[in-house]
């Protein structure tokens, strides 16, 4: 178990080949993406200079997935990211994204735990409410996601378990907004 938590060191040779120091073999970007999906932390360093190239290669993995049609990032989010590089928001965006992904990861872990315990999976409505709260926090309340066409107000009422999860998420988002406003 301790071995799975250890950061996997990948060295990039002058030939641009990537070398896995644990298994003593060459790996591809797909291999690295697989390690990350399996829960490993990966660090990629240039053998000659010692420069950390992890960010560069992770962005390359994301770009390759996006170019193959595995679209995870909506165009409006990509536009907002590009805009954030040219505004004063750059100091806030990384912290916001990290906190958002941590909340997403925790929510996924809770959902998986609930499914393992024989409990029902929260409804689509609860997930939509979480997405709406996330977008509202991300845009400072400037935009919201509407309900799906044809959905009635009855269709968007979350279950009591979903309401508990939603109130927890709203509380966390509120705390995050407070922290972000203090940073400004």
Image (spheres, rainbow, N blue to C red):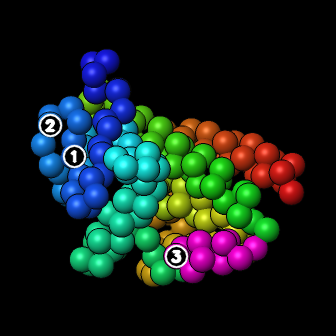
- The x and y percentages for residue 64 are 29, 71
Residue at numbered disc 3: 78
Q: Considering the image in quadrants, where does the C terminus appear? A: bottom right
Please say if 58 is above or below 68: above
* Distance of label 2 from label 1 (alpha carbons): 7 Å
Please say if 129 is above or below 168: below
Where disc 1 sits, the SS reads strand
Which of discs 1 and 3 lies nearer the camera? The answer is 1
Residue at numbered disc 1: 19
Q: Earlier in the sequence, mark 3 or mark 2?
A: 2
- The x and y percentages for residue 135 are 61, 65
Q: How many marks?
A: 3
Mark 2–mark 1 CB contact (< 8 Å): yes
Mark 1 surroundings: few (<14), some (14-19) or many (≥20) residues within 10 A: many
82 in magenta: yes
From where the camera sits, is residue 146 visible?
A: no
Mark 3 surroundings: few (<14), some (14-19) or many (≥20) residues within 10 A: few
Residue at numbered disc 2: 24
Residue at 37% of width from left, 59% of height from top? 57
Quarter of the image for residue 113 reads top left
Query: Which one is nearer the viewer's eye here, 32 or 16?
Result: 16
In the figure, is residue 34 to the left or right of 152? left
Part of the protein shown in magenta: 77-87
Please say if 69 is above or below 94: below
Q: Which SS does the magenta portion mostly show?
A: helix
From where the camera sits, is residue 108 visible?
A: yes
């Amino acid at each position: 178990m301790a071995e799975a938590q250890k950061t996997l060191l990948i060295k990039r040779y002058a030939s641009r080949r990537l070398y896995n120091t644990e298994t003593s073999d060459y790996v591809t970007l797909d291999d690295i993406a697989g390690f990350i999906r399996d829960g490993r932390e990966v660090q990629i360093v240039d053998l000659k200079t010692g420069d950390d190239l992890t960010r560069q290669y992770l962005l390359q993995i994301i770009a390759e997935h996006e170019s193959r049609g595995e679209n995870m990032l909506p165009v409006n989010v990509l536009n907002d990211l590009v805009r954030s590089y040219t505004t004063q928001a750059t100091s806030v965006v990384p912290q916001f994204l990290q906190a958002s992904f941590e909340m997403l990861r925790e929510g996924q872990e809770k959902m998986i735990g609930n499914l393992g315990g024989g409990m029902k999976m929260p409804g689509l409505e609860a997930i939509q409410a979480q997405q709406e709260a996330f977008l509202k926090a991300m845009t400072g309340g400037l935009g919201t996601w509407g309900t799906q066409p044809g959905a009635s107000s009855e269709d968007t009422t979350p279950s009591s378990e979903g309401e508990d999860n939603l109130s927890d998420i709203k509380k966390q988002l509120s705390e995050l907004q407070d922290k972000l406003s203090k940073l400004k």
